[in-house]
Structures are given as C-alpha cells and as structure tokens.
Image: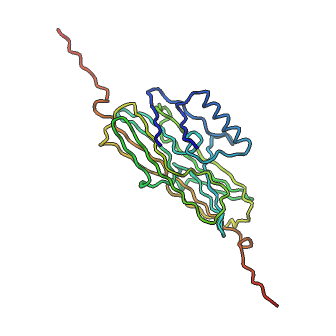
Amino acid sequence: MANSTETTKKAAERPESAERTRGGQFFRPNCDIVERADELLVLADVPGAQGDRIDVKFEDGTLSIHAPIDRRQAPETEYLLCEYAVGDYWRTFQVSEAVDASKISAEYANGVLTLHLPKAESLKPRKIAVTSA
Amino acid sequence: MPLRYRGLRHPAAQLRDEMDRLLSGFLGHPSEGSWTPGSRGQPAVNLWEQGDTLMAELEVPGVTPEQLDISVVGGELTLRVDRQIPAEEGLSYHRRERPTGSFTRVLRLPADVDGNRVQAELKDGILTITLPKAEGAKPRKIEIASAS
C-alpha cells in the first residue's frame, strides 16, 4: 500500500508529542516486554541515542530508562515536512517480579536498547521430584 | 489499522488526535504500536532543504540496511521499510508496542532530484537521505544584458 504525501515549500507544522515531566521534554519510547523462563526482556526503541549515554537504573522495583538525544539539525531549520520531534527518551516501569538487580545487563544496537533482567533464583521454575513411598 | 500520516492534515483533526492521545495517556491506555507518526511511532519523515540539497530523515530502530529499499524517480522518493520482529514462541508478552511489519511510502519532493547522487546513511536507527537537486531544478542567476 503506497501513501503519497505532497510536500510544499511552506514550513510544515511541528508535532508537539513530547510529554513534560521533571521540567524537561521527554518522549516515551515504544517498548516490548517479554517474559522468558529465567529473565524479563525489555526492548526499547530509542533511535538516535548513543549507547554510552543511555542511563538505566533499577531501584526499589522501578526500572527507569533515560536516553538523551541531541538535536541533529540546527534549531532554525525550516522543515518542508515535519512529522516527528526530537528529544530525550524517558520511561519507567514497575517491575513486580523479583529481579536479581546485580545481574541486570543492557546492550544497545541500531537504535534499540535491550535489557536483560534475570529473575531471582528463588523464582525460577524448579522441578520438584516426587518420591513415592 | 489504516496507515495515517499527520502533518498535512487539517489542524482541527490534528488537535482532536492530540486530545485523544493525551486523554488515552491519562486513562492508562498507552498508544498502541502502529506506524503512526507523531506519537513516536515509526516511521515518520522529516524533510528539509539545505542549499541545493533536500534532506530526509526517518527513525527506523532495529532495521538493517537489507530491510530498507529507497528509490528515486524524478521528484518522487519511495521508501520501503520491512521491520520484522519475530515473536518468540511460548513466551508471554507483557507489552508489545514496537511497530512491526512492512510499509511503503511515497513522497513527492518539491524539486526534481539527481538520482545518481542520492546517498543514504543508517546510524543508531536513524536513516538520513541526502537528495541533491537535479541541475534543472537549481535556482539559476540570470544575467541581464543591458542593451546600451
């Protein structure tokens, strides 16, 4: 299915899709959360972020992701078509499952942040052998 | 879900969408992951002019160069993105917001483009396309011969 969009010479309207929190403008990244047998997997779309500047915190069952994004164009750029705005990503999750905080790992590639939250030992499914008397 | 593109719609419709989005956020129904631009969904396009060049930018996180297909004919830019996120069998998804699937988009550019010199770069999930204008589309200074 092809969608045709006419672009005109007048500057396009800028979308205002950032939510204001903590005195700054933040965007909410789209996330997938998958539960595996031994871990929770969080995938977040944070295009334009730099891996070494992404801040991931886990505290009291709250996982927070903060990815600062720099402007890629000069502020005075006049857009012919402007369908998204650029700004920092921020999102928090309440994690109810017991997670082994010391073993949380994160990797970043191609604009996608992947977090591995291993479940605490006590919560992993364990097969209990039944002994017959 | 139909593909909708904001930015060139009636302002009243945009306002209504924006209110819907805000309200749905309040009521705890996060916007679903679909290719809807404006809500941080992908792939929305930004386009601007830099001298004799048009620049287009898209957010395509997790997409490899093989999943992108860009072609230019005259003043028409066709973008094809195929973003596949294979679902893992037997796992429970607590959330699925990241858009998946393939889409095609055609942009009519305000000027013809020199197809041989178009360049595309993919970095950190951002696709930047450099579209130099065709010779005939560049502004030309006309010398005025004074008949003296």
Most extreme residue toward the right, as rendered?
Answer: A133
Total count of labels: 0
Task: Using residue A80 as the reference point, say whether residue B27 is left or right of it.
Answer: right
Q: Quadrant of residue B31?
A: top right
Most extreme residue toward the top, as rendered?
Answer: B148
Relative image position of residue B132 (x, y in whole percent): 34, 37
Question: Which residue does the image show at 36% across and 31% down from the upper left?
Answer: B111
Relative image position of residue B140 (x, y in whole percent): 28, 25
Most extreme residue toward the left, as rendered?
Answer: B148
- The quadrant of the image that shows the C terminus of chain A is bottom right
Which one is nearer the viewer's eye here, B59 or A128? A128
Q: Is residue B96 above or below residue B110?
A: below
Which one is nearer the viewer's eye here, A17 or A86? A17
Relative image position of residue B57 (x, y in whole percent): 46, 42
Q: Quadrant of residue B96?
A: bottom right
Q: How is the image coloured?
A: rainbow
Question: Which residue does the image show at 55% across and 33% down from the upper left?
Answer: A14
Task: Using residue A117 as the reference point, say whether residue A46 is left or right of it.
Answer: left
Question: Which residue does the image show at 69% across and 54% down from the upper left?
Answer: A93
Relative image position of residue B50 (x, y in whole percent): 39, 34
Q: Is residue B61 above or below residue A23?
A: below
